[in-house]
Image (cartoon, grey):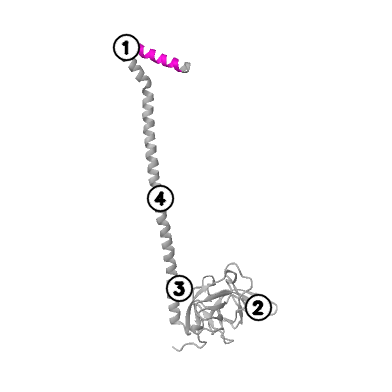
Amino acid sequence: MKPLNLIAILLFMSGAVWALTRSERSVREIQRGYFGAIGPFLKSGSQTEAYARSFLDEVQHSKVLEAEIATVNREIGRLHIVESRYRELERENTQLRHALDFKKTSSFNVAAAQVIRRQPTTWWQTVEIDVGEERNICSQLAVLSNEGLVGIIDRPAKDRSSVILLTDEACQVSAKVEDSPEVGILSGQRGQFEGAPLLRLKFLSKNAALHSGQRVFTTGRGGIFQANILLGTIVSVEKGAEDSEALVRPAVNFADLGTVFVVLSKEPLKK
């Protein structure tokens, strides 16, 4: 045993013997002094124990809250999915309702179709629709939406067809400006990759008196597109040395094509 430990034991035993040999009054005084000395430590230990229990209760409560928060977060995620699906169904329902209204009011014999494929590299040039030769679809038929001219059938297959969009430079349409004698050729512009595409109306007269907001329609010339189909509205006019050109904002939202209509006959329906 180490000397210090031995000395501590001897001192403790001596103190105990000394205390026990005192009178009862002295023993009580010693007890009072002892408990008075250790009282603050006992009180502090009791408070520490209370704090420890309170801390453990808080930890347990935090774990319960974490579990409840995780459950709520999962439910919120599920509701977001439900809401997203609901909005998608609402959008599809709106498109179908507009399509039905358009088909009822259209003066042409049309076949409804859905855009089923678009390539990012040819987003403004072509789309693929879900009708083809089985539905009497052939090339050079006009494709419309309830907003205006979409484009023209390019290559029909058995159950699908590719469509050249009006925003493609290859799609050229004879066009006229409302409340004006001006007639020109409307087409898309090459190299449009960002933002909403604009069309270019070429071969207008040198002093074309046009202004922003005037609407542009098909003339019906050329035997492909029927007359008076809305193409877009004029944004600005650029006058050149020999003729003028105008930038035209398409009537159709080409960024979000859904339901379209293929015109099966160039002759309008008799009503």
The dot on residue 95 is 3
Q: Which residue is mark 2?
A: 244
Residue toward you, 232 or 206: 232
Question: For the view shown, which residue lies furthest in the left direction?
Answer: 24
**Above or below, 69 relative to 167:** above
Q: Would you identify the image quadrant in which residue 79 lies?
A: bottom left
Badge 1 or badge 2: first in the primary sequence: 1
Q: Position of residue 96 (x, y in %)?
A: 44, 75
Q: Is residue 11 magenta?
A: yes
Find the magenta span and give its range.
Answer: 5-18
Badge 2 or badge 3: first in the primary sequence: 3
Q: Residues within 10 Å of mark 3 (few under 14, many from 20)?
A: some
Residue type marked 1: Ser
Q: Nearer the viewer, mark 2 or mark 3?
A: 3
Residue 41 seen by the camera: yes
Mark 1–mark 4 Cα distance, whole angstroms, equals 63 Å
Residue type marked 2: Ser
Q: Position of residue 77 (x, y in %)?
A: 43, 57
Q: Which residue is mark 1?
A: 26
Badge 2 or badge 4: first in the primary sequence: 4
Mark 4–mark 3 Cα distance, whole angstroms, equals 39 Å
